[in-house]
Each structure stands twice: as structure tokens, then as C-alpha cells.
């Protein structure tokens, strides 16, 4: 549920990013920002350069950003994918030095120190992470993609960058069942309601807004409740759910603190006491 004031103000911060920067830093090259790329699997973006500040959203390995300013260990960036603006630790962004060839398609996977599942793991990756593959190896019948330095990832956990994983974003969202709910989360390690919608649709090649209110106002077309079918969206104030069929929905929610199935009528009754009735239905 993404209705904190800082989240709602993000679009305003995006529109004013260049104007604000001109008043703070007198440097022409900062007007449009410097190209950067996220170099860690997942990094939290915050409204202020403070670790105590809550998470607005997350950026994933290989996603590109415009670095608008840096200082005191923080980078102020604008995400190219959805125009989100905020602060991330400066170690999480680096210059763009190479093309990324593949994207992780498994909800979670590992980087190994070499092409063998018995080798030590180096890092965990999430669906949506992008990597540069330079070679392939096979060990005991398992194919691995090799990266710089000889590190390896399971080949069938990846796909070529730019190739949609599926045309059915609901099937992708279903792969996140029991993933922990995380406010502002947007990865296989933890995800929130609108993050589940955005990441699942991203893997089908679609670019959609990040926040619930943005999705409710501009994603797809409005429909009536009696038209709900698989893939349609149900919105409450600050929450969104995905219809698996005409009676069942899938959502990342604070009730189970996970991605879970729930009957539509059951969810309307359960959520109603706190957030009232659904505010709308849309077909993306």
C-alpha cells in the first residue's frame, strides 16, 4: 500500500527536479543529469538522504538512472524506467560501461563463483535484474551463463534482454506467491501491491506507473465490477490487487504479509472496515 505523502509527492518532485537542482548546484551538466546504472541487486530509494527515511521504491541491478546530484554518500537520481526521483546510496550506482545482455526471469536465483552449483554463492539476484553474459559453460548437464571474472548464473533462470518473458503477466505474478510483503518493495526478496503489478508487467515488456494512485488513474481503461476477469485490477485507496479469474485475486498485502490468493468477496469484506469499498476496476 503506497499512499504515504512522500510517495504521492514524487511526481511533483519529478517535474521540479531540474528546477530544484538549478537552485542548489550551479553546474550545467547537472541539468539533464549524468547517465548511471544500478550495480547492486536491489537498492532502496528514499525521499530524503537518510537511512531512517522510509522506502519509496526500489531499483534493480542493471536499471539505468540519471544522476542529478551527489554528496555525503548519497546520489539523487531519476529512474529511467518510471521517472521516479529519490535518494540512493552512491555506491549503488556506477557509470554505464557495458551493454547488459540478459535479464533474470526466476523470482530469485544466485550468482556462483564459477559454473557449478556446488561452488560458493557470491550474490542473490531477483527477477528483473540485468546482467552481462560473456560466455556459456555446461557442468553435469546444467547450463551456466558466465559473467566477467568467471562468475556464473543458471542459464534457464535468465532470458535475453528485451525479450518479453510471457504475454500473461498474471502467470508471472503468480510466481511470487508467498514472497514476503515489503512496503516499497519491488523484487523477489520483498514486494508490495503496486510493485507486484509493475514488475510482473515489466517482464512482459510493458512500462507501467509505480504507485497505486498512478495505476488507478492511468493504467488501462475503467471497467465495471461485473466485467472483472483474469488480469483485471481492483483498486482500494492505497491498494491494488490482480484478478486471477472472475472470483479470485492475487495481491501483496499486509494482512498475510505476503503475496497470497484471496476470494474477491472475502477481500472486499475484510478490507472494507479500514479502507472502505473498492475505488475502481481497470483492465490494463
Image (tube, rainbow, N blue to C red):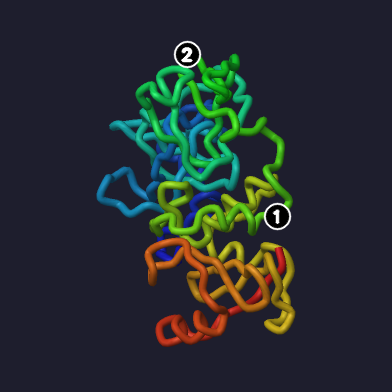
Residue 72 tag number: none
Q: Element type at marker 1? A: loop
Comparing 63 with 178, the one in front is 178
Q: Earlier in the sequence, mark 1 or mark 2?
A: 2
Q: Which residue appears at 57% of the width and 71% of the height? A: 249
Q: Which residue appears at 45% of the width and 46% of the height? A: 58
50 versus 25 height, above or below:
below
Residue 242 rendering spot, x and y as whole percentages: 60, 67
Q: Quadrant of residue 102?
A: top right
Residue 21 rendering spot, x and y as whole percentages: 46, 39
| Residue with the mark numbered 2 | 150
190 versus 87 height, above or below:
below
Left or right, 50 with reference to 27:
left
Q: Crowding at label 1, few (<14), some or many (≥20) Cα neighbours within 10 Å?
A: some
Q: Crowding at label 2, few (<14), some or many (≥20) Cα neighbours within 10 Å?
A: few
Left or right, 228 with reference to 106:
right
| Residue with the mark numbered 1 | 168
Q: Are marks 1 and 2 in contact (CB under 8 Å)?
A: no
Residue 1 rendering spot, x and y as whole percentages: 45, 66
Left or right, 247 with reference to 271:
right
> How far separated are the C-alphas under marks 1 and 2?
34 Å
Left or right, 162 with reference to 18:
right
Comparing 136 with 277, the one in front is 136
Q: Is residue 19 visible?
A: no
Comparing 153 with 41, the one in front is 153
Q: Which residue appears at 51% of the width and 74% of the height? A: 262
Q: Element type at marker 2? A: helix
97 versus 223 height, above or below:
above
Question: How many callouts does the rendering have?
Answer: 2
Q: Which residue appears at 70% of the width and 35% of the height? A: 162
Residue 71 rendering spot, x and y as whole percentages: 33, 31
Q: Quadrant of the C terminus?
A: bottom right
Amino acid at each position: 500500500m503506497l499512499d504515504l505523502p512522500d510517495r504521492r509527492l514524487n511526481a511533483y518532485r519529478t517535474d521540479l527536479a531540474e528546477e530544484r537542482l538549478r537552485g542548489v548546484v550551479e553546474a550545467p551538466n547537472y541539468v539533464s543529469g549524468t547517465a548511471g546504472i544500478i550495480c547492486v541487486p536491489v537498492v532502496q530509494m528514499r525521499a530524503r538522504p537518510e537511512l531512517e527515511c522510509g522506502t519509496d521504491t526500489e531499483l534493480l541491478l542493471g536499471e539505468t538512472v540519471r544522476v542529478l546530484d551527489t554528496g555525503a554518500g548519497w546520489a539523487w537520481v531519476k529512474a529511467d524506467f518510471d521517472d521516479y526521483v529519490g535518494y540512493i546510496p552512491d555506491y549503488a550506482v556506477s557509470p554505464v560501461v557495458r551493454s547488459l545482455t540478459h535479464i533474470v526471469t526466476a523470482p530469485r536465483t544466485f550468482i556462483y563463483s564459477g559454473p557449478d552449483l556446488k561452488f560458493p554463492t557470491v550474490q542473490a539476484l531477483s527477477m528483473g535484474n540485468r546482467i552481462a553474459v560473456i560466455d556459456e559453460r555446461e557442468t553435469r548437464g546444467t547450463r551456466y551463463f558466465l559473467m566477467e571474472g568467471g562468475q556464473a548464473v543458471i542459464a534457464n533462470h535468465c532470458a535475453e534482454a528485451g525479450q518479453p518473458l510471457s504475454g500473461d503477466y498474471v502467470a508471472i505474478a503468480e510466481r511470487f506467491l508467498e514472497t514476503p510483503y515489503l512496503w516499497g518493495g519491488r523484487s523477489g526478496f520483498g514486494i508490495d501491491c503496486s510493485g507486484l503489478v509493475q514488475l510482473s508487467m515489466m517482464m512482459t515488456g510493458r512500462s507501467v506507473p509505480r504507485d497505486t494512485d498512478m495505476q488507478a488513474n492511468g493504467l488501462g481503461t475503467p471497467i465495471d465490477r461485473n466485467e472483472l476477469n483474469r488480469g483485471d485490477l481492483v483498486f482500494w485507496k492505497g491498494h491494488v490487487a490482480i484478478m486471477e479469474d472472475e472470483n479470485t485475486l492475487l495481491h501483496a498485502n499486509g494482512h498475510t504479509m505476503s503475496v497470497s490468493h484471496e476470494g474477491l468477496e472475502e477481500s472486499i469484506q475484510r478490507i472494507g472496515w479500514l479502507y472502505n469499498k473498492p475505488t475502481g476496476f481497470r483492465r490494463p
